[in-house]
Image (tube, rainbow, N blue to C red):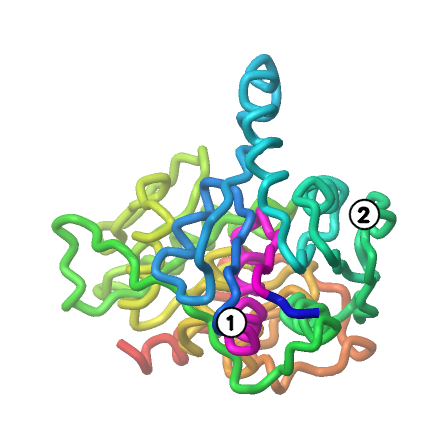
Amino acid sequence: MKISSILIIKPSSLGDIVHTLPAAALIRDAHPRATITWVINPEWAPLLRGNKSVDHVQIFPRDALGGFGMSRHLLPWLRETSRLRPDVALDFQGLLRSALIGRISHPRAFYGMSDAREGAHLFYQHTAPVDRIAHAVERYLQLVESVGVPVTRPLRFPLPTGDPIPRFDDEEPFVLLHPFARGRGKSLSDLAIEEFCHALAPHRVVLVGRTKRALPLPDNCINVINHTSILQLIWLIRRARFTISVDSGPMHIAAALSDRLISIHTWSDPRKVGPYNQAAWIWKNGELCRLRDLPAAAKRPPGRPFRPNDVPQLLGLVRQHL
C-alpha cells in the first residue's frame, strides 16, 4: 500500500508526547513525502512547534467536549476529523477515546498496540505486539516497526528551542528543581525543597512546576511556580547547569535534552517510567546511580520517600556542574 498520509494519535500527556517524538521522526524518515498529522491536546501542541516530522496539528479539544459546551464543539470537531481519511492511523495512546478518534478519521489501515486498554483493541485493524513492561519509547518503536518503519539509532527527540523568560539572567549558573508530580507520594516535601535551596546556596535554584502549596524559600531560590509556559520550561531546562526532578513530564523533557539530570523515584519503577536517557542519574531507595547501572527489577526493594537528609547525597554530583 502506498502511504501518502499518516495520522499520529497521541493527545496527552506531557511525558508520553516526548516519548512519541522519536517514533514520529522515524516515520518521517521512512515516508519523507507523506503528509503527517498529529492529534494532540491544545496545552501540549507547543511541543510540536517547528517539528519537521509533523505537517499538521489536529487539536483534540478535550475540555471543550465536556459539560454544557459539548454539543457546540463536538459536531464541528467530528466533521473535521472525519475528513482526514489517512492511509495509516497509529494509536500511540491506547485508550478508548484515542481508538475512537482513529476510527472517526476513517483510515485505510488502523494500527494499535497489544497493551491498549478500555477495549481500544476492538477498533484496530492491526495490533502490534509490545512488551507491556518496557519503557514507553520502546513500545512506541515496536508500533512503528509493525507498519514497516525501520528503527535506526541514535534516536532523536526534536523539541523546540523554547521561549525566554523576561528579565531572567541565564548567564549566571543555576540548578533547576522540579519537585511536584500528580502521582501520590511522588512530590518532594516542603522541608526537602527548602533543604535543596539552602544546601546549594549561594548558587541560584530555580523552582518550577504547578502546585497550590505555599512554600517559604531562601533568597537564592527563584520561584516561578505556576508562572511558566511549557516553552519557557523547555528554555529553562536547556540553560540549567543541572536539573533535579521527581518522576514527571518535565523530567522526561530534561532527559531528552541532557544527561545532567537526577530523576527522583519513590515508588515508581525507573526502568519503565524513568528517563529514557541511559546516562541520566536516578535516585531510588537511598541509592544514586546512572540509569544504565540500575540493578535489575527483581533485586530492588519497592521504594521509600525522599527525605531532607537525602539531599547531601546529591550535592557532590550537582556541584560539579556549577
Q: Position of residue 116 (x, y in %)?
A: 80, 54
Quarter in which the N terminus is drawn: bottom right
- Residue in the image at 86% along x and 45% along y: 119
Residue 115, numbered label? none
Q: Earlier in the sequence, mark 1 or mark 2?
A: 1
Q: Which residue is mark 2?
A: 120
Residue 150 on the magenta span: no
**Residue 284 in view (yes/no):** yes
- Residue in the image at 24% along x and 61% along y: 204
- Magenta highlight range: 4-31
The amino acid pointed to by label 2 is Ala
The CA span between labels 1 and 2 is: 26 Å
Residue 5 on the magenta span: yes
**SS for tag 1?**
helix
Closer-to-camera residue (55/290):
55
Q: Position of residue 216 (x, y in %)?
A: 34, 41
**SS for tag 2?**
helix
Q: Which residue is mark 1?
A: 28
Mostly what secondary structure, the magenta segment? helix
User: Callout 1: 10 Å neighbours few (<14), some, many (20+)?
Assistant: some
- Residue in the image at 18% along x and 63% along y: 170
Please give left or right for residue 4 compared with residue 317 in the image: right
User: Callout 2: 10 Å neighbours few (<14), some, many (20+)?
Assistant: many
Q: Quadrant of residue 49?
A: bottom left
Q: Is residue 21 above or below residue 57?
A: below
Q: Is residue 7 above or below residue 132?
A: above
The amino acid pointed to by label 1 is Arg
- Residue in the image at 60% along x and 56% along y: 8
Q: Position of residue 161 (x, y in %)?
A: 30, 63
Q: Position of residue 294 (x, y in %)?
A: 65, 81
Closer-to-camera residue (22/81):
81
Please give left or right for residue 76 compared with residue 103 in the image: left
